[in-house]
Image (spheres, coloured by chain):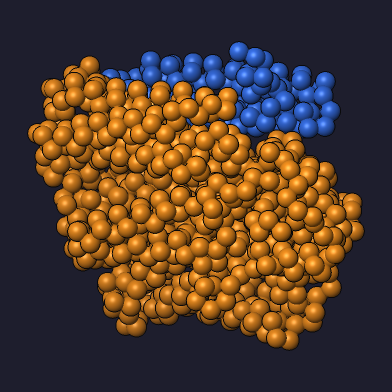
């Protein structure tokens, strides 16, 4: 399979022009079809910045209202909307997306790759983020914004107490935005593991990649519980399925569990990339490698896992048994240890290096001071008695801002100043930057340090008016500080804007950094590397300073463009040995169209035009299936399998390409959602006082057995076909795939009949409502599995899949395995177990 | 059934960076879930304090998991001594993470000694 396609050139200018033809971005309306990671990363960051300004404006409105005790600046209902939207915008539309944007922009450059592994998914993620964010933000303009606090506790957010559209805007808009987060989580994980340049073994990759790997996996596991919670709450509001209504067998505390199962890891999802920026920049300005690379890796992984064991510390006052509270209290203290390890690593690196106090370093010092304070108040809040005292006061608001602004915003600005020359080719103003830093630092502490005292003397959060004699002094200082803070941020933004016009041209690698992103041109070209260099050290530019030249001269891997394909190396996740040549899709409108169709679904659900929502969903699925069609050996993808002499084979001609990994990671996210659903089932069964389990299951178990058997036979048949493909045998592949689809269709028919005929009352009892959601879950998967098999059968007939291109059925097999697994788990949990354990109340 | 099929249990495999923490997560879920179910099904009398079968069960479970993690930490540390480069890195960091998981298990499990389970 490995033949020479055509001659290659090593003339740098010709190579650059040829690569640009293949990788370049179109202009005009076609710019909407761009899938390049650099462009999309910048779009993510620019959009995140716009939402940051929006959220910041809301913060200023809050501080204006609270500046004086009886201020009539805002009506209470507007104040509630502004407070809710400030938290929501900052968390969901600014913090996470801008960090994802940074990772999307930087990671391929740091890893020596040309793009992320799924460029169209990057684009879909961006459009979902933009449209979801706009839908959510529009609610405030329409004066219909959610007003229940950014965590939307039930029953306040339920239709009984929030009858307007505010909660619906939040639930639908956030779920739409989370498609973006999950797509980034999946592709960042797979890109880090599978697209590092040749030789970059796992233990040699930049620390920033470890941090983003942890963040991405946390998104994959942590976001689905909230997505499930949002679906359940929206179902309750829209059609009356009582998941959170006590008298019908539901429980509002279930919402809190689902929200904080996401919400606490979320804090670390935001903090870890911030810490990753620190671990990247600090050694550069200390002029030496970081002390304790292995310690940092261990600390990052420990933080990522332990952070999932803390969620109940947000619920200490809801009446959970003391012993359980102390488990979470102890875990909340334990998580401080890995963070402490990182601090000592940073201090040791500074101590043993020769630190230079450039502007990015100033922001890192600000981070060190503020985040330590936030971490210490975090340990205070982990103590149950103290938490009871300050629960729902301004102390918690102060702590949260110290952690989030200190842990994320300060490193982010440090990173912005550090990587700005890479983006623009120009240096920012040191003087304006220092003014910006000091105003921000002083303003921030003036606002939030004093807020600890405001809380300690008892001022509750989320009130629009207060007792001036008790809290007036503190609040006026906080408001003054807030405006100083705004002036500082305005100064930073002014500096960023002005530097594009007036900044001095930056020298190459202006900070003398060690990582590979500084080996690309400034500003970066769309293909990053004209040839992909071998890297076997953690500090490629310190050890091989001539890399930028040799890369541009095409002296390394894949210095070829005449085939017209976008290619990047696929490597072994552990050793970095080159395994495949990954061919990437070119620019496409399909992600935009799919996101537009999903936006129609979102808006239709909002205004309750359900037929239009169904139509939008079908159209979106159509676009996504068309997207999957243009892959592999398709004429618009890679019909010609020849590669450069010595290069590994195209990934679509192997059995282990990155798509397989993407499916695996996507199923992890799917599994987290499924486990959250099972958790909800068992939680309500165990805890809800009005839960009623019937003596016999209302579901026809014999029919469900038949459906499950058909599905299982289909999966086993598919396994056999994949096994034969591994041995390069494809006789009977198409007809086999068609029959497998038919077996899947049998199961779909059984499930539809079950849903239609079973005596379920999903609007009357939480029990039946959960059953319906569980059945719909398996029905959706059980419907998609045969459609995918059918498409594979058609692709075999078209010649896109077969022994010569065996890889796609292996991906579909993963989906079938998952579908069969969840089918039987649902059968055991909702049909068998209640029967075996007896109907109980 | 070649040996490479079981490569993931080799001390030099990077999966050891997460196995200890996954074990800790499972232990944590069993502790919290088990406590909730036990309190729902058979809550002890409040005047029994911490001297209950639930506390005993959770305590024994904690010690078993801690012992398992300690053994894994020791095994990885032993393997790290005999290796260089990448294998040494993963065995050493893996060992450290088993120790961290064991510490987290013991520290988070300590409250079963002194607190009644269902109040």
Give the total number of marks visible in the rendering: 0
Which of the 4 image quarters holds residue A496?
A: bottom right
Q: Residue furthest top?
A: B1
- Camera-nearest residue between B30 and B93: B93
Q: Is residue A340 visible?
A: no
* x and y, in percent, of residue A169 in the image: 30, 64
Residue at 16% across, 28% down: A699
Looking at the image, is A510 positioned above or below residue A765?
below
| Quadrant (top left/top right/bottom left/bottom right) for the C terminus of chain A | top left
Looking at the image, is A231 positioned above or below residue A664?
below
- Camera-nearest residue between A545 and A374: A545
- Camera-nearest residue between A579 and B103: A579
Looking at the image, is A267 positioned above or below residue A666?
below
Q: Is residue A812 left or right of residue A658?
A: left
**What color does chain B have in the rendering?**
blue
Which of the 4 image quarters holds residue A718?
A: top left
Residue at 66% across, 59% down: A564
Q: Is residue A97 left or right of residue B15?
A: left
* x and y, in percent, of residue A326 in the image: 45, 35
* x and y, in percent, of residue A28 in the image: 53, 78
Q: Is residue A137 visible?
A: yes
* x and y, in percent, of residue A788 in the image: 39, 41
Residue at 81% across, 69% down: A13
| Quadrant (top left/top right/bottom left/bottom right) for the N terminus of chain A | top right
Which of the 4 image quarters holds residue A525?
A: bottom right
Q: Residue furthest bottom?
A: A502
Residue at 58% across, 31% down: B21
Q: Is residue A172 left or right of residue B82?
A: left
**What color does chain A have in the rendering?**
orange
């Amino acid at each position: 399979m490995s033949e020479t396609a055509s001659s290659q050139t090593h003339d740098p200018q010709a190579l650059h022009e040829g690569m640009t033809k293949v990788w370049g971005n179109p202009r005009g309306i076609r710019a909407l079809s761009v899938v390049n990671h650099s462009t999309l990363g910048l779009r993510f960051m620019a959009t995140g910045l716009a939402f940051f300004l929006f959220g910041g404006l809301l913060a200023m409105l809050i501080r204006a209202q609270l500046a004086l005790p009886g201020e009539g600046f805002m009506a209470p209902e507007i104040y509630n909307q502004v407070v809710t939207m400030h938290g929501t915008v900052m968390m969901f539309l600014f913090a996470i997306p801008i960090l994802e944007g940074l990772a999307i922009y930087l990671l391929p450059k740091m890893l020596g790759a040309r793009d992320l592994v799924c460029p169209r998914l990057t684009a879909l993620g961006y459009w979902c983020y933009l449209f979801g964010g706009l839908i959510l933000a529009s609610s405030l303009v329409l004066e219909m914004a959610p007003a229940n606090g950014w965590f939307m506790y039930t029953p306040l957010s339920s239709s009984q107490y929030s009858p307007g559209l505010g909660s619906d805007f939040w639930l639908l808009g956030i779920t739409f935005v989370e498609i973006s987060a999950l797509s980034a989580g999946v592709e960042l994980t797979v890109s880090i593991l599978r697209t590092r340049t040749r030789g970059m073994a796992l233990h040699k990759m930049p620390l920033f990649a470890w941090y983003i790997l942890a963040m991405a996996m946390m998104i994959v596991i942590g976001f689905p519980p909230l997505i499930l919670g949002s679906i359940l709450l929206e179902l309750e509001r829209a059609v009356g399925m009582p998941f959170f209504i006590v008298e019908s067998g539901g429980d509002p505390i279930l919402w809190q569990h689902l929200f904080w199962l996401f919400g606490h890891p979320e804090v670390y999802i935001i903090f870890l990339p911030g810490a990753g920026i620190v671990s990247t920049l600090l050694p550069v300005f200390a002029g030496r490698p970081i002390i304790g690379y292995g310690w940092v890796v261990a600390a990052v992984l420990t933080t990522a896992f332990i952070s999932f064991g803390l969620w109940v510390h947000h619920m200490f006052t809801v009446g959970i048994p003391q012993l359980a509270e102390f488990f979470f209290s102890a875990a909340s203290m334990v998580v401080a240890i890995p963070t402490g390890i990182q601090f000592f690593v940073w201090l040791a690196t500074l101590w043993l290096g020769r630190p230079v106090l450039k502007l990015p370093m100033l922001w890192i010092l600000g981070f060190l001071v503020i985040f330590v304070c936030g971490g210490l108040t975090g340990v205070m809040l982990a103590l149950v008695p103290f938490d009871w005292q300050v629960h729902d006061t301004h102390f918690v608001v102060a702590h949260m801002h110290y952690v989030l602004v200190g842990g994320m915003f300060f490193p982010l600005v440090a990173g912005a100043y550090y990587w700005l020359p890479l983006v623009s080719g120009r240096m920012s103003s040191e003087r304006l930057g220092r003014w910006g830093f000091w105003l921000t630092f002083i303003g921030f502490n003036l606002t939030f340090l004093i807020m600890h005292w405001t809380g300690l003397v008892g001022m509750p959060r989320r009130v629009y008016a207060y007792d001036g004699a008790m809290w007036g002094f503190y609040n006026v200082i906080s408001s003054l500080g807030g405006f100083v803070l705004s002036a500082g941020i305005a100064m930073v933004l002014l500096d960023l804007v002005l530097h594009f016009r007036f900044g001095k041209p930056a020298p190459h690698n202006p900070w003398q950094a060690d990582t590979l992103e500084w080996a690309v041109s400034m500003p970066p070209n769309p293909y990053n590397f004209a040839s992909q260099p071998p890297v076997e050290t953690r500090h490629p530019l310190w050890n091989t300073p001539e890399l930028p030249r040799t890369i541009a001269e095409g002296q390394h891997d894949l210095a070829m463009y005449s085939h017209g394909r976008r290619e990047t190396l696929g490597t072994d996740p552990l050793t970095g040995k080159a395994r495949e040549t990954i061919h990437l899709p070119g620019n496409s409108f399909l992600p935009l169209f799919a996101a537009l169709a999903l936006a129609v679904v979102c808006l239709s659900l909002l205004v309750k035009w359900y037929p239009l929502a169904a139509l939008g969903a079908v159209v979106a699925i159509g676009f996504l299936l068309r997207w999957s069609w243009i892959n592999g050996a398709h004429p618009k993808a890679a019909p010609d399998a020849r590669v450069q002499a010595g290069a590994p084979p195209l990934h679509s001609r192997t059995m282990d390409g990155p798509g397989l990994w993407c499916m695996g990671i996507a199923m992890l996210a799917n599994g987290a959602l499924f486990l959250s659903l099972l958790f909800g089932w068992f939680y309500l069964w165990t805890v809800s006082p009005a839960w009623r389990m019937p003596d016999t299951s209302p579901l026809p178990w014999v029919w469900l057995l038949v459906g499950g058997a058909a599905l299982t036979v289909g999966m086993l048949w598919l396994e056999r076909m994949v096994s034969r493909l591994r041995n390069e045998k494809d006789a009977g592949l198409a007809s086999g795939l068609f029959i497998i689809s038919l077996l899947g269709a049998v199961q779909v028919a059984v499930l539809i009949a079950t849903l239609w005929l079973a005596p379920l009352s999903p609007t009357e009892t939480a029990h039946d409502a959960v059953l319906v959601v569980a059945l719909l879950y398996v029905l959706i998967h059980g419907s998609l599995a045969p459609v995918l098999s059918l498409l594979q059968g058609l692709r075999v007939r078209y010649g896109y899949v077969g022994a010569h291109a065996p890889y796609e059925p292996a991906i579909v097999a993963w989906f079938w395995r998952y579908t069969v697994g969840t089918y039987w788990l649902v059968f055991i949990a909702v049909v068998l177990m209640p029967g075996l354990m007896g109907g109980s109340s | 059934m070649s040996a490479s099929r079981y490569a993931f249990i080799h001390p030099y495999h990077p999966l050891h960076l997460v196995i200890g923490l996954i074990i800790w997560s499972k232990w944590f879920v069993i502790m919290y879930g088990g406590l909730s179910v036990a309190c729902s099904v058979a809550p002890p009398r409040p005047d029994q304090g911490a001297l209950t079968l639930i506390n005993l069960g959770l305590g024994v479970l904690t010690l078993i998991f801690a012992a398992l993690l300690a053994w894994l930490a020791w095994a990885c540390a032993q393997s790290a001594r005999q290796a260089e480069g990448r294998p040494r890195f993963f065995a050493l960091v893996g060992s450290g993470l088993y120790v961290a998981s064991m510490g987290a298990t013991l520290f988070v499990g300590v409250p079963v000694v002194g607190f009644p389970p269902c109040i």
